[in-house]
Amino acid sequence: MHVLIIGAAGMVGRKLTSALLEAGGIGGAPIEKLTLADVVAPNSPDTTIPCDTLAADLSAPGTAGRLVADRPDLIFHLAAIVSGEAEADFDKGYAINLDGTRFLLEAIRQEGTKEPYCPRLVFTSSIAVFGEPLPAAIPDDMAHTPLTSYGTQKAICELLLADYSRRGFVNGIGIRLPTIVVRPGKPNKAASGFFSGIIREPLNGMEAVLPVDESVRHWFASPRAAIGFLRHAATLDTTPLGQRRTLTMPGLSATIAEEIAALERFGGTAATGLIRREPDETIARIVAGWPQNFDARRALELGFAAETSFDDIVRAHIEDEMGGMTARA
């Protein structure tokens, strides 16, 4: 099997690469070739599996055609401009998030005109496709009413994925990711970045800024769960999806106060004391329009799984990124 990961230099892309290489295969099929692409060439992994690393801007004409020219069997499309950046730079957001995805789908279709070709395409969407008015728990089939450019771009891509799949050009599945915490490494430009920062930085003895009220409720899953979503989506029988090709992934609905309480159980008051409250009206406005809770029964019935407590999310971060430590209480 030839696997292509677009957006492989990002956090999720790096973790997915490591998981696939550790397993050596997916769905019982050995990985015979791996292609890693991002706007900046990903680091070459230490592996005996043939692996190409490419600098590739998916929004540039011709790039998508080159990526699918050797007909990968499985494509993970993770590349995106994150929410805050897409809102700040309208042109860039639409170029990367919409045009890049459309170019990829069209390149796959054109490749199939030469001889039959219908790869599995796993596309990462977002819960930002939903907007007000919001019910207490959002069902999987709720209408899309995004309140940001990022959410709009993802919603359009979900429709494209469904149509190209309906026509038999690609076997697509979209997964709407919860906000992924705790993200390792440096903060990015996502409006949601503080959700990770107020755990990650204090556990490392550093100050973190909280720009919104502690009563804010949101939908979360860990990086570990996200990799599980992607691997499961890659091998799932898509027949039960019908024309509804995108699924809301399971997650945990929690307030920031509950998040901070979990931090205290692992890092004590020394950690929670490093959170500095600094309101940011722009971030607060964006976050206020985001969904808070979901009914993800469709994904659960199809075998997707995530954490059920914020302690589990913090514990996963400590085990995967910090070598493990024991809760204070």
Image (cartoon, rainbow, N blue to C red):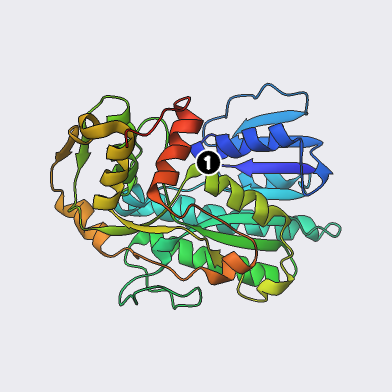
Please indicate whether residue 283 sits to the left or right of residue 12 in the image.
left
Residue farthest along the top direction in this orientation: 46
Q: Please, what is the three-letter code of the amino acid marked with disc 1? A: Val
Q: Residue furthest right?
A: 115
Q: Position of residue 50 (x, y in %)?
A: 77, 28
Residue 181 shows in the view = no
Please name the residue shown 69% across and 68% down the image: 165
What residue appears at the point 57 percent right and 56 percent down from the top-left corner? 305
Q: Residue at x 36, y 60 (%)?
A: 149
Q: Position of residue 86 (x, y in %)?
A: 36, 51
On screen, 20 above or below 213?
Answer: above
Q: Identify the image quadrant of the N terminus.
A: top right
| Residue in view at x 24 percent, y 51 percent | 257
Q: Quadrant of residue 286?
A: bottom left
The residue lying toward the viewer, choosing from 49 and 39, is 49
Residue at which label 1 appears: 12
Q: Left or right? Give the position of 264 relative to 234.
A: left
Compared with 43, 11 (above or below) is below
